[in-house]
Amino acid sequence: MTTDIDLTPAERRVIVTHGDAWSLKVTFPRTLAGATIAAQLRARHDSPDAINLNISTPVDAGGTSSFFIGQDAASVDGYFDVQITEAGALPRTYLAFRLSVKADVTRP
């Protein structure tokens, strides 16, 4: 008998308005000193073209780290995840999201 163990993160949905800046604060349960954080937005999980998302430098405090991830101007629906490679470790995907961009009415 085989029992699956799913190590993939649950996917969350983020809804933003077209053209708006957005960001999410991520708090990690340990310090991320020396870690590399990456996040790319793609139209589909297997799309070859990606938009790199903005990631702030993690701030360590009291055994945790916090950072922000986002975009200066939302433009397309898609999927993104947050991959963290801690010093001396293999990459791991901790968060997964579906980004929905709603149409705006007001334009500059």
Image (cartoon, rainbow, N blue to C red):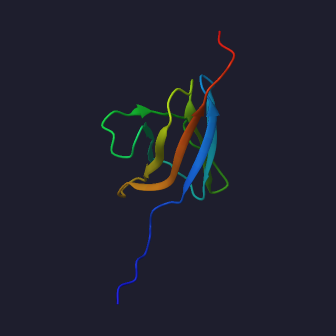
How many numbered circles does the render carry? 0
Q: Which residue lies furthest to the top in this view?
A: 108
Q: Work out whether residue 31 or residue 96 is closer to the camera in this orientation and state it.
A: 96
Residue 90 percent coordinates (x, y): 35, 57
Residue 80 percent coordinates (x, y): 47, 44
Q: In this view, does 70 lie to the left or right of 2?
A: right
Task: Identify the residue at image location x=45%, y=41%.
Answer: 39
Q: In this view, does 98 lie above or below 50?
A: below
Q: Which residue lies furthest to the left in this view?
A: 48
Q: Quadrant of residue 7?
A: bottom left
Q: Residue furthest bottom?
A: 1
Residue 6 percent coordinates (x, y): 44, 70
Task: Identify the residue at image location x=53%, y=60%.
Answer: 10
Residue 76 percent coordinates (x, y): 50, 30
Task: Identify the residue at image location x=44%, y=55%.
Answer: 93
Task: Identify the residue at image location x=65%, y=12%.
Answer: 107
Q: Quadrant of the N terminus?
A: bottom left
Q: Quadrant of the C terminus?
A: top right
